[in-house]
Image (cartoon, rainbow, N blue to C red):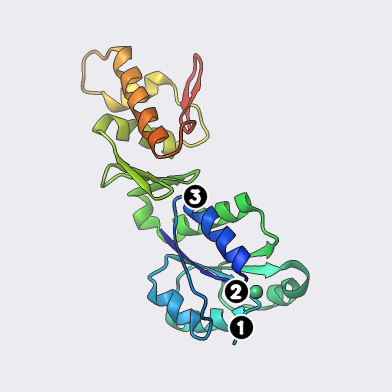
Amino acid sequence: MKIFIIEDEYAIRMELGQLLLKYGYECESSENFQNIGNEALNSGADLILLDINLPYQDGFQVCRDIRKQSNVPIIILSSRNTDFDELMGLNIGADDYISKPYNAQVLLARIQKILSRTYEVQSNAVLLHKGLTLNLLKATISYSGQEKELSKNELGILRILMVNKGNIIPRDAIIDELWQSEEFIDENTLNVNIVRLRKKLAEIGLPDYLITKRGMGYFV
Ligand code: CA
């Protein structure tokens, strides 16, 4: 998923870009604000982060211009005391508002929520959780610009865990789900696949993604 950042303050733009890249998003931005709305649209972004105080025209105008052409999700980043009241009174077609200074985890959660709501069709094929993207059609995991292919079993295990994110999934439930047709599955088969999956997650920078709850099962 690509996010276009419209922000004239260099430090904030860089900080946002690094944060989003770290969580597996592709990012684009520009230093030329004269035609920034069109530039964002032409980038093919899946979501736009929009500052309010900008050169040439303010973010409200940019938002209205984008809305004339596209329904791409827009999250407005507003400075708390100056823009916020005005912002609340305006109905300019943004999907969400976040005040600056923003909380990184809140921002990421809102982005993920809007993306999955907007791209529901794709989200059946792509699962996102804690920055990791699992592509069910390609059988790949990606994080922070790195990608790994998964085997059928690794894919199945991670899919169950990501669909049920935050909940502990018992070993038996995973075995039932993955190997229903087999008459007998060695406990060890699951262990081997978990080890391989953890190794691949570590190789793309997520060594602690898959957590073991001793005697209970696994969760992400
Ligand atoms: Ca600004």
Q: Is mark 2 on a helix, strand or loop?
A: loop
**Which residue is identified by label 2?**
8
Mark 2 and mark 1 residues within 8 Å of each other at the beta carbon: yes
- Residue holding disc 3: 22
Q: Quadrant of the N terminus?
A: bottom left
User: According to the image, label 1 marks what residue?
Assistant: 55
Residue reaching furthest to the right: 81
Residue located at (59% from left, 87% from top) = 56
Q: Which amino acid does label 1 sit on?
A: Pro
The residues bearing labels 1 and 3 have C-alpha atoms spaced at a distance of: 28 Å
* Helix, strand or loop status at disc 1: loop
Q: Distance between the residues labelled 2 and 1?
A: 7 Å
Instruction: State the separation of the CA atoms marked 2 and 3.
Output: 21 Å
- Who comes first in sequence, dot 1 or dot 3? 3
Return the x and y of residue 165 as percentages of the image width and height. 48, 37
Tell me if mark 3 has few (under 14), some (14-19) or many (20+) residues whose alpha carbon lies within 10 angstroms of its own.
some
Dot 2 or dot 1, earlier in sequence: 2
Crowd band around label 2 with a 10 angstrom C-alpha radius: few (<14), some (14–19), many (20+): some
- Relative to the observer, which residue lies in front, 36 or 165? 36
Q: Which amino acid does label 3 sit on?
A: Lys
